[in-house]
Amino acid sequence: MLLNLTMEEARDFIESAEIIRKDQVIPGHFRPCPDSTYKPGLDWLYRYERAMMKSLEPVLTSLPPDLIGEKSLFHAALSNAFRHAHHGDRLKPITVSVLQGRKGFLIQVTDCGRGFNLHKIYKHCRRKRRYLTPVGSGIRRMAESRRYGVFYNPKGTAFHLLYLFEDDLEKHFSHKLTVLLEPHAEAA
């Protein structure tokens, strides 16, 4: 679900949030991966996702099974940063931070692009416009998710994925759901 939330509010909500992993991901630094099932050019993402999840398994005892993979929101965020923000530049860094608190975890994916107009993208989702290619469908999956809360910074350069260990997101954040036809409340 798309949330109208700030990073500080999310950190406060999951209580005692600490960074447990922070990476600067440079796609060009990954070796090719012949085992990758991902689209051509995204084998770096295949390798990175699996390495990250393997390192988090001991810390996050109950990782959701759909956190990684081609249909996951994390995959969509990294892919969007690479394709749209960095225009496929394999040397531009994408920063990934994972924070864990008592109530859940928060993943932040930050790119160094110029951002995007959240209001315009949300409007497309609301009107249920279909894209001609699968590119751009990630935001629709984000809006429809009930397992994860998703929000962006006002510029559209940082994606945040919120997961609660034992609670229902909608129960706590129904008042923070993004209304897809109104501008993002954080916008400056």
Image: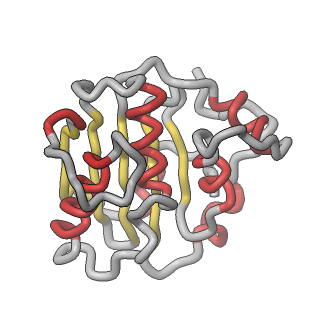
Q: Nearer the viewer, residue 147 or 176?
A: 147
The correct choice, above or below, for 134 with respect to 112 in the image is below
Q: Nearer the viewer, residue 112 or 41?
A: 41
Relative side of 21 to 140, left or right: left
Residue drawn at the location 22% of the way across and 25% of the way down: 91
Q: Locate the N terminus and report the quarter of the image it occupies.
A: bottom right
Residue drawn at the location 39% of the way across and 69% of the way down: 104
Relative side of 51 to 46, left or right: left
Q: Position of residue 80 (x, y in %)?
A: 47, 38
Residue drawn at the location 24% of the way across and 37% of the way down: 27
Q: Nearer the viewer, residue 163 or 101?
A: 163
Q: Locate the C terminus and report the quarter of the image it occupies.
A: top right
Whether residue 72 is visible, yes or no, is yes
Can you name the residue that lies furthest to the front here? 34
Q: Position of residue 184 (x, y in %)?
A: 66, 34
Can you name the residue that lies furthest to the right here? 127
Residue drawn at the location 38% of the way across and 33% of the way down: 82
Q: Position of residue 123 (x, y in %)?
A: 78, 35
Q: How many marks?
A: 0
The correct choice, above or below, for 127 with respect to 57 in the image is above
Relative side of 76 to 118, left or right: left
